[in-house]
Image (cartoon, helix red, strand yellow):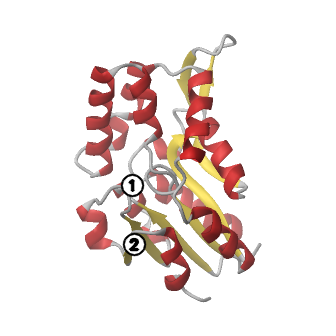
Amino acid sequence: MVGSKIIIFDCDSTLSSIEGIDELARIAGDEVRQQIEEMTNAAMEGKIPLESVFARRLEIIKPTQEQVTNIGELYIKTVEPSALSAIATLKENGWLPIILSAGYVQAIEPLAQYLGIESIEAVPLLFNPDGSYQDFDRTYPTTRSGGKLEIVHKIRNQYSPSVMVTVGDGVSDLETKPGVNMFIGFGRYAVREKVKAQANHFIQDLAEVLSIIPSP
């Protein structure tokens, strides 16, 4: 895969309109949902470090394996309208799409399969034999600030691509900018002013990616 072209997408509020963690919180009731949404937004806007809320949100919600599976189905129902066609075109043009997320592998897998994306970098959740929540992989980079850039460096070392592009809505996605050729901010579902100001490009529709990605 040396010389390959790689495009990396965030999942929540990018490939899908939802934030998976907020939907899990919704199941737990309005009070929990509001609390979790405030924590998520503060982290995505860069007001607080991601690691300060990552474990806490899961400890509050304690999602079951079944609930996480249901979020996977919801991702597909709320997929960004242009995502399927845009990713198909990118693959036809020789790009390797990867999902890079601070979300959960088990929830993202169905969406990745639907979109034809084979590579997922996201946080594994751990469940007890009865499907109840146990923990998450606390060593995984995207559970903390700067983690997405760590993964970008790992991908670069693995593939030695000729060009790398990242696409996402949050400050954690913006953190990948030093490691890639182009960072594209995405604002269909959430406009983060810091992301909009510092992105190389800022778009509202994933189809726009096709006209602005660099040619190697």
Q: Is residue 160 visible?
A: no
Identify the residue position indicated by label 2 in the image.
203
Q: Is residue 201 above or below residue 56?
A: below
Q: Secondary structure at mark 2?
A: strand
Identify the residue position indicated by label 1 in the image.
172
Q: Are marks 1 and 2 in contact (CB under 8 Å)?
A: no
Q: Position of residue 166 (x, y in %)?
A: 50, 68
Residue 158's quadrant in the figure? Answer: bottom right
Q: Is residue 145 above or below residue 96?
A: above
**Amino acid under label 1?**
Ser
Around disc 1, counting alpha carbons within 10 Å, would you say few (fewer than 14), some (14 to 19), or many (20 or more)?
many
Q: Tell me what residue is drawn at x 56 percent, y 19 percent.
A: 64
Q: Position of residue 111 (x, y in %)?
A: 63, 48
Along the line of sight, the residue nearer the viewer: 14 or 172: 14
**Amino acid under label 2?**
Ile
Q: Position of residue 70 (x, y in %)?
A: 59, 30
Along the line of sight, the residue nearer the viewer: 16 or 156: 16
Q: Is residue 165 above or below residue 136?
A: below
Choose the circle earlier in sequence order: 1 or 2: 1
Residue 41's quadrant in the figure? Answer: top left
**Side of 50 relative to 63 (left or right):** left
Q: Is residue 210 above or below residue 53?
A: below
Along the line of sight, the residue nearer the viewer: 101 or 136: 101
Residue sitting farthest toward the right: 1
Quadrant containing the N terminus in the rendered view: bottom right
Q: Secondary structure at mark 1?
A: helix
